[in-house]
Image (cartoon, rainbow, N blue to C red):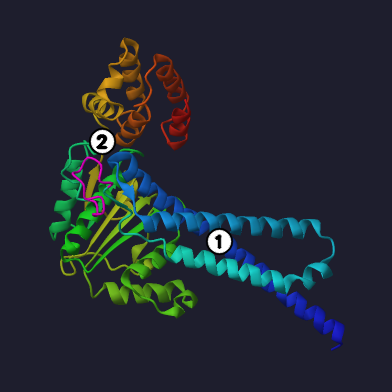
C-alpha cells in the first residue's frame, strides 16, 4: 500500500472514530441536562415550599454541570458548523485526530460530572425561623402543617405502607402539581433520617417522559455500590443480572419519580417485592392506567385542595398583610388563588411570588398572565418581573 493511501486510510479511521465520539458526547450531554433538570426540580421544590437552603456541594455540582453543558454544546455546534461549511475533506481529516482528543476529553468530563449527580439530600435548614442550627440537615416534614398542607395524610399513608408486609408496590397518582414528588421526597428523606428503617438500600430514580431503562440501571448501580469498571461494556441483560444478584439478597426501597409508562423492572434486574424480601417500590405518575400496568397493590390518588384550604394556603404564602392592604387586592387575590386550581405547588410558589406586590395593578397584571398561561416556572418568572 502506498504511503499516501496509508495516510488517507489512517485519517479516515480517525474521522470515523471522531463521528462515533461526537454521538457519545451528544448523548452524554443530553443525559447530563436531564439529570441537572431533575436535581434543580428537587432543589426548587424545597426552596420554594419550605425555605430550605441548597447544600453547597449541590450548588457546586450545578455550576459545574452548567459549565460542562455549555462547553459541550458549543463544541458540538462548532463540529456541525465545520462539517457543513468546510468543503475540503482532506483538510477536515488532517485535523481530526486533534479534534477527537478534545471531544474525548470533553466526553470524559461530562461523564464524570454526571456520575456525581445523584444526591440523597439536596438541601439543609437555612437557620431562618428555626432557632438557629443553620448547618443541620433538614428535619422530617411529614407532620408539618404549613407549606405541605393537604399532603400530611398522604405522606402518613405511604409511610404506613412502607412498614407493613402485605404491600410491596405503591402507586401515587394525580394531576401535575398536586404534590406527588413532595410526598415521595418526604418519605425518602424520612427513611434516610431513620437510618434506612431496616432497608439496606434506599434508591431514588427520576424516570421522566423519555423512558430509558439503561439510565435506570445506571442509577441503581451507583446506589448499590457496584463499581466494577467493566459496567459500561456490559449488555442490558448482563447489567440486569448483576443488579438482581445484589438486590435479591438485600431489602431495598426503590422510589421512581415521574413515571409516564410501564417500567419493566424485571428487565432492569429489580426483584419483585414480596413478603419474604419485604422490599418496597413506590412511584409517582399522572395516570391510573400506569398504576395498573405497574402492578401497584396500593393505589393512592392525590386530590386537589378544596377552596377553603387552597385559599388559606395562598394567604399564608402571599401574606395576610399584603392580601388585606387594599380592598381591590383582596378580591383580586382570590381570583389569582382560584387560577391555581387547588394545586399546592402552584398555591405556594405563586403566593410567594405575589407577597411583594402591594398595588392592585400588579395583581391585575398577575391575573392577566395566569388567565393566559397555566401556572408554571415560566409564569413565575413573569410574575417576578412585574
**Which residue is nearer to you in this view: 11 or 270?**
11
Whole-Å distance between the Cαs marked 1 and 2? 37 Å
Relative to residue 29, is residue 147 depicted above or below? above
In the image, 40 versus 277, the foreground residue is 40
Q: Which residue is mark 1?
A: 27
Residue at 73% across, 71% down: 96
> Height in image: 275 above or below 371?
below
Q: Is residue 314 above or below residue 86?
A: above
Q: Residue at x 49, y 57 (%)?
A: 65
Give the SS element for disc 1: helix
Q: Position of residue 293 (x, y in %)?
A: 33, 53
Residue at 43 percent of width and 57 percent of height: 60
Of residues 14 and 46, the one drawn nearer to the viewer in this rendering: 46
> Is label 2 in a helix, a strand or a loop?
loop
In the rendering, at what x and y percent does residue 183 appear? Answer: 25, 46
Dot 2 alpha-carbon crowd within 10 angstroms: few under 14, some 14 to 19, many 20 or more: some
Q: Could one spot residue 60 in this view of the protein?
A: yes
Residue 371 located left or right of residue 82: left
Marker disc for residue 303? 2
Contact flag, marks 1 and 2 (Cβ < 8 Å) = no
Residue 36 in the image: state x and y as whole percent. Answer: 45, 54
Position of the N terminus by quadrant: bottom right
Tell me, yes or no, whether the highlighted magenta stretch contains residue 99: no
Is the stretch drawn in magenta largely helix, strand or loop? loop
Q: Is 68 rendered above or below residue 311?
A: below
Q: Is residue 81 left or right of residue 321?
A: right
Which circle, 1 or 2, is nearer the viewer?
1
Residues in magenta, as a range: 126-138
Q: Position of residue 53 (x, y in %)?
A: 32, 47
Q: Residues within 10 Å of mark 1 (few under 14, many from 20)?
A: few
Amino acid at each position: 500500500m502506498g504511503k499516501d493511501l496509508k495516510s488517507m486510510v489512517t485519517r479516515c479511521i480517525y474521522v470515523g472514530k471522531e463521528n462515533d465520539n461526537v454521538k457519545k458526547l451528544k448523548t452524554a450531554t443530553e443525559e447530563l441536562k436531564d439529570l441537572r433538570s431533575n436535581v434543580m426540580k428537587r432543589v426548587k421544590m424545597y426552596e420554594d415550599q419550605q425555605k430550605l437552603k441548597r447544600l453547597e456541594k449541590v450548588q457546586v455540582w450545578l455550576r459545574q454541570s452548567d459549565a460542562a453543558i455549555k462547553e459541550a454544546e458549543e463544541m458540538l455546534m462548532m463540529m456541525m458548523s465545520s462539517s457543513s461549511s468546510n468543503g475540503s475533506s482532506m483538510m477536515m481529516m488532517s485535523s481530526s485526530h486533534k479534534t477527537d482528543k478534545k471531544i474525548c476529553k470533553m466526553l470524559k468530563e461530562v461523564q464524570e460530572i454526571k456520575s456525581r449527580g445523584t444526591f440523597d439530600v439536596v438541601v439543609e435548614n437555612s437557620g431562618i425561623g428555626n432557632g438557629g442550627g443553620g448547618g443541620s440537615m433538614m428535619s422530617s416534614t411529614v407532620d408539618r402543617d404549613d407549606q405541605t398542607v393537604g399532603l400530611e395524610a398522604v405522606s402518613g399513608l405511604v409511610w404506613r405502607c412502607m412498614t407493613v408486609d402485605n404491600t410491596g408496590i405503591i402507586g401515587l397518582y394525580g394531576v401535575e402539581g398536586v404534590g406527588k414528588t413532595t410526598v415521595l421526597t418526604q418519605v425518602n428523606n424520612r427513611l434516610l433520617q431513620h437510618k434506612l428503617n431496616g432497608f439496606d438500600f434506599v434508591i431514588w430514580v427520576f424516570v421522566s417522559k423519555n423512558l430509558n431503562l439503561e439510565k435506570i440501571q445506571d442509577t441503581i448501580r451507583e446506589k448499590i455500590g457496584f463499581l466494577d469498571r467493566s459496567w459500561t461494556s456490559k449488555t442490558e441483560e448482563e447489567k440486569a443480572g448483576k443488579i438482581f444478584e445484589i438486590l435479591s439478597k438485600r431489602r431495598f426501597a426503590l422510589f421512581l419519580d415521574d413515571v409516564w409508562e410501564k417500567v419493566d423492572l424485571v428487565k432492569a434486574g429489580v426483584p419483585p417485592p414480596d413478603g419474604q424480601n419485604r422490599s418496597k417500590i413506590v412511584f409517582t405518575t399522572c395516570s391510573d392506567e400506569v398504576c395498573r400496568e405497574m402492578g401497584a397493590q396500593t393505589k393512592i390518588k392525590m386530590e386537589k385542595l378544596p377552596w377553603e384550604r387552597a385559599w388559606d394556603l395562598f394567604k399564608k404564602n402571599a401574606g395576610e398583610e399584603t392580601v388585606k392592604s387594599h380592598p381591590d387586592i383582596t378580591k383580586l387575590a382570590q381570583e389569582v388563588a382560584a387560577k391555581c386550581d387547588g394545586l399546592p405547588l402552584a398555591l405556594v410558589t405563586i403566593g410567594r411570588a405575589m407577597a411583594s406586590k402591594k398595588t392592585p395593578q400588579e395583581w391585575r397584571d398577575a391575573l392577566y398572565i395566569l388567565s393566559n398561561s397555566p401556572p408554571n416556572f415560566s409564569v413565575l418568572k413573569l410574575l417576578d418581573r412585574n
